[in-house]
Amino acid sequence: MSTEAKKVMVIGGGIAGLSAARELSLNGIQVELVEKADFLGGHAIQYACKATDNCQQCGACTVESVLKDVVLDPGIRVHLASEVIKISGSPRFKVQLGRVAVSDNDDTSKICQEGYEKNPVQCAAVKGFSKHNAIYRTADGRLNPDICQTADKLEVDAIIWATGFVPFDPDQKSTYRYSELANVVSGLDLERAKRASGSVLRPSDGKPPRDIAFIQCVGSRDERLGHLWCSQVCCPYALRSAMALKHRNPDANITVFYMDIQNTGNNFTGFYQQCRNDLNFIRTIPIDMYETDDDRIRTRYMSETDGKPVDAEFDLVVLSVGIMPGNDNKALADLLQTRLTPDGFAASTDKLHLTATDQKGVFLAGTVQGPKTIADSIAHAGHAAGEVIRYLRRAS
Amino acid sequence: MAEETIKLGSKKQSKFIDKVKELLPEGENLNLCLTCGACSSACPATGLEGMDPRKFLRMAALGMDEEITTTPWVWMCSMCQRCIHVCPMKIDIPQLVYNARSSWPREKRPKGILGSCDMALQNDGCSAMGASPEDFQFVVEDVLEEYREAQPEFAEMEAPIDKEGAEFFVNQNSREPVTEPDELVPLWKILHLAGADWTYGSKGWAAENYCMFLADDDAWKHVTTTAAKQADDLGCKVFLNTE
Amino acid sequence: MSQPNTTDMQKIETASNVLVLGGGLAGICTAEAIAAQGYPVLLVEPGEAVGLKAESRPLNSYSQSEKDTLNKLVEQVRSSENIEILEKTTLSCATGVAGDYRVWLSGQKPLSEKQVGAIVVASELIRNPLNAAYGLEIGGPVITQTDLEHALASETKKFTGKTVAFVVGFGQSGNPLVMERVLRSALELAQIEGTTVYVYVNDLKVAAEELERLYLKARDNGVLFFKLSQAPVIETQENGISITYSDPVILRDISAQADFLVIEEAMEADSANAHLACLLRLDLGSEGFMQTDNVHRYPVSTNREGIFVVGGSRQVKALDQACMDAENAALQVRRLLGDGTRLAPANKAVLDIGKCTFCLTCYRCCPHGAIYWSTENKPVISLIACQGCGICASECPMDAIQIGEFSDKAIHDQVQKSMANTGKAPNIVAFCCQNSAQEAAQMAADFGIALPEGLHLIQVPCAGKIDLDYILNAFVQGADGVLVMACHPRNCKSEHGNTYARWRVNDAQNRLSKAGLDKARLSFVTLASNMGSEFARIVTEFETWLRDL
């Protein structure tokens, strides 16, 4: 087969980009993996394992494993803190890369500021969420351009667009007072904290929370915001997180506020039955969050049994934020000369070709095309890799 | 309320909600409720009279016209619109409430609101407290003079009534001139310091919306057109509604 | 860990053709994708014909051009020189391993034997009306979702001016595929003159592309949704159906009359999967699917190398997702079969035939079906199919199997060496599965978390490789405590390695008790590769406990 000498650029180093890159490389295609952030793994590498006594199939460990494979794969050249700024030519695309200034304002930097001097390797790992990302850093914790910024011009035969999503910004739902109240956190905050410390603690005082609320559909299924989609991942992550919390702390009293519970994957019926036994489900959405004198969060909702308003207090409120189209989607669609859907995700040609775009040689993988779980992102990425191989074969 | 089983008809019948939909430019979205309950969580009137916005909308959708046109809850809604603000579908529940109010016989509507609206209809001032244009003019002039003298830095301050060609037409809640005249002054000071060219109107000076809260469309139309006409007659460019 | 030397690699020839079982659209897509990668395909369908006839999903959600594409695809597969189609044919028997499966097919032609390099199972879903859940018989005003779809395709006048009620989510959890059918039909009905449409639903499963929009459109067209947590009470009457329920929003009892009641249908695994899984030595997953509930099988793998599952074989998948699976399966086939030869480390699992007593233990316990019986009546470990987990090696009563660099001797030596220079701190030997605990330990170290001074990590390919001997020997060598650290249940890459490890720990604990030792000195722990801080916590707590003894 004549794909040997071919080269493919994958834009985005999240679970979809990593999976696509790895599949292509395993099939003998050279890969240029371009990632805007200064670490590989995207959002998925920030998630924590949600096992109870049993694996709950969240897939977080599979991300770790694909990341490791990619990092060690000599057929994949990684460009971190890099972005595509120009594309010309066809069918062989000439690509120009630019460097992205890495923001030092994010949470991980805070951890690192405190610890760089003490343990630079640790910080490199924390900064990149996974130990596998440490390879891209020097001993003082900075990105090592000799390893991950070795080129600014590429020539490739095909492109996989896999830049993922942005989590919904909960400040857009102002009544939740996300930025204001320490004990109102997003699902992603919860994951990151758990990954870093292995446990979930109340941000205001570092004590284990007993009464915990999850609020579903924050930013999803919302016509007002123009978000007419179910994000597909929030019910799975909230229920698995809640069950893991309950397993760790059987005294925890966990409430899930929801509209409709979506399936979590295999054997949903059995899993959901357990959830129903261990968690409180309330089919309504609370709105206002108030702080009590002892740092708890008070909110109000309608009782399902008597229709009366109930005031409830929680130690921790978790907002299950949804999947939103990436901020760069428009710019990338222009660069790649392809389309977005009215929702702002990358448009595929039709339902039977979910990875194909209007542009020859440009394919989609993962949540850039629409909300997907880790499992579905991996499958979509494999589909994209397969389509790329077919395309290269036809082109040669 | 009797708790008998509600029967949903199997034939489409003209329902209250359908009439409202026809009336509203965006009324078509009254169907779109997800029953998520966000409105009820946010509504200050939730739970009063065993009612809440979600239940109210749902009853309307199910054609329970009898219940929604008779529940006194509609008079407890303050029309604050928080329900719209938090609704993922932007459903205009207050409009439904308004239409439910207007289906009440006028004399059955709450006495306080009813009396205030009726009072507003008594003279051209449209004051819900019955203050006439003359009373209003007297109070304004009296208070203005007092402050000009007491506070030399505001010696040039004005509070004109029926000044032709003024840019802003400003209305005024009756409570201040009638019971708290000193409270009129802060607004004047702001307008003065901002250098605004403004005026009250002798007609339609009162800013209260009781006829609207009463859902008495004709009366409300009378009140608003009186004020608007005065602003137009004076040649004002902007109507500054202070309520 | 050292990479195997290329001189130790063995070249293995693989058959280049692929068996695809199931000729619905998932099977069609798979056959096309595999043929496009250059491998001949044998497409086998138990029913009358491959293509739309064999497809279980309604296609009403697809546009005409998409349907045309599908028809074209079926035609293309039918006429492809690289694809042989056998209809009314089933698999009778299968033996062999990846790269060299032997399959026997029976059908129109007499039983025939074929050699194939890989197998892809593309079972269809089964539509199952759930009327029994409501205590109802199908007939008269009670119709199934399928009946309704047929009626909507041909005789919509039947519904003019009528009230139609749907019930969904009470006889099953449901899923987006089921929900899409209901939403589409409800919307179509609502657009017919004078209809009233009620949908009684538990959870609206809208976690798929465009479903939220479809739900909105249905509401916009006047479909009334009632979200109930329990099924309504349904009674058939002379002139229709009565539906009674307590409304959770207005908290009142409601009764409605309908002319038609549409009963939900499950889209579920084909019951034939169980037999097929047995023939192919696949572990069945939950709810009758042919992929275990194990994240390491994403997206289309099974416990056996060279056997892949797509679409309805592995989950309730919509057609677009089945197409995705098809392409993934084709990629996996390409990786497996390559250009007809494969290199594999010769020492992956080495059988000392002199020690073998032909007891079949290895054959039975291999989770990957990688061990077969040769024509010389000897066990053979396929170097392609073997995953090197070492479960067979540990289970073999004669210790006749050794795994690459994880030989019994190598592990004993490692334990002995680690005990050579010990300080005052309690000596802890932690046997760590390389897929989970070893990674977690590394993560803890990289994150700078302090670990006990006397902790000695012994890496194993899978917890299933941890012999009873290893554990007991660690105590003999001077360990104060031993940890056996495995993957969480259902997360083992070799399916049951952690279970074997747990059994052996139980066994060893009994022996420790008999020898007068506190059996808590031996502990079995499960964790994931990304649980660095949990790893540190577990080993530290264990050390504290040992110190306090």
Image: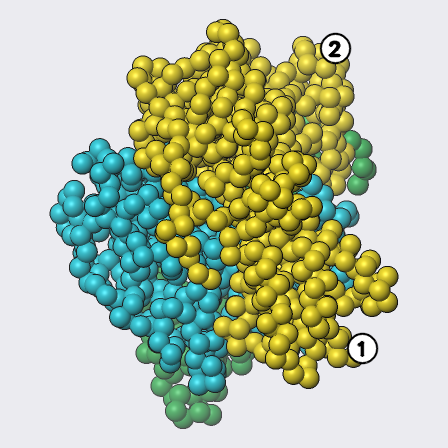
Chain colours: A cyan, B green, C yellow
In the image, residue B70 sits, relative to residue C549, either above or below, namely: above
**What residue is drawn where x is 37% and y is 51%?**
C7
SS category of the residue bearing label 1: loop
Report which residue position mark 2 lands on: C238
**Quadrant of residue C485 in the image?**
bottom right
Q: What's the amino acid at mark 1? A: Leu
> Which one is nearer the viewer's eye here, A310 or A73?
A73
Q: Position of residue C52 (x, y in %)?
A: 44, 16
In the image, residue C419 sits, relative to residue C188, either above or below, namely: below
Residue C143 visible: yes
> Which one is nearer the viewer's eye here, C197 or C448?
C448
CA neighbours of label 2 inside 10 A, class few (<14), some (14 to 19), many (20+):
few
In the image, residue A20 sits, relative to residue C36, either above or below, namely: below
SS category of the residue bearing label 2: loop
Q: What's the amino acid at mark 2? A: Glu
Residue B130 visible: no
Q: Which mark lies nearer to you, 1 or 2? A: 1
Q: Position of residue C532 (x, y in %)?
A: 57, 67
Q: Position of residue B121 (x, y in %)?
A: 55, 54
> Which one is nearer the viewer's eye here, A261 or B80?
A261
Report whether A282 appears left or right of C322.
right
Q: Position of residue C330 (x, y in %)?
A: 39, 33
**Quadrant of residue A97 in the image?**
bottom left
Q: Quadrant of the N terminus of chain A?
A: top left
CA neighbours of label 1 inside 10 A, class few (<14), some (14 to 19), many (20+):
few
Distance Cα–Cα, label 1 vs label 2:
79 Å
Residue C252 disc label: none
Report which residue position mark 1 lands on: C549
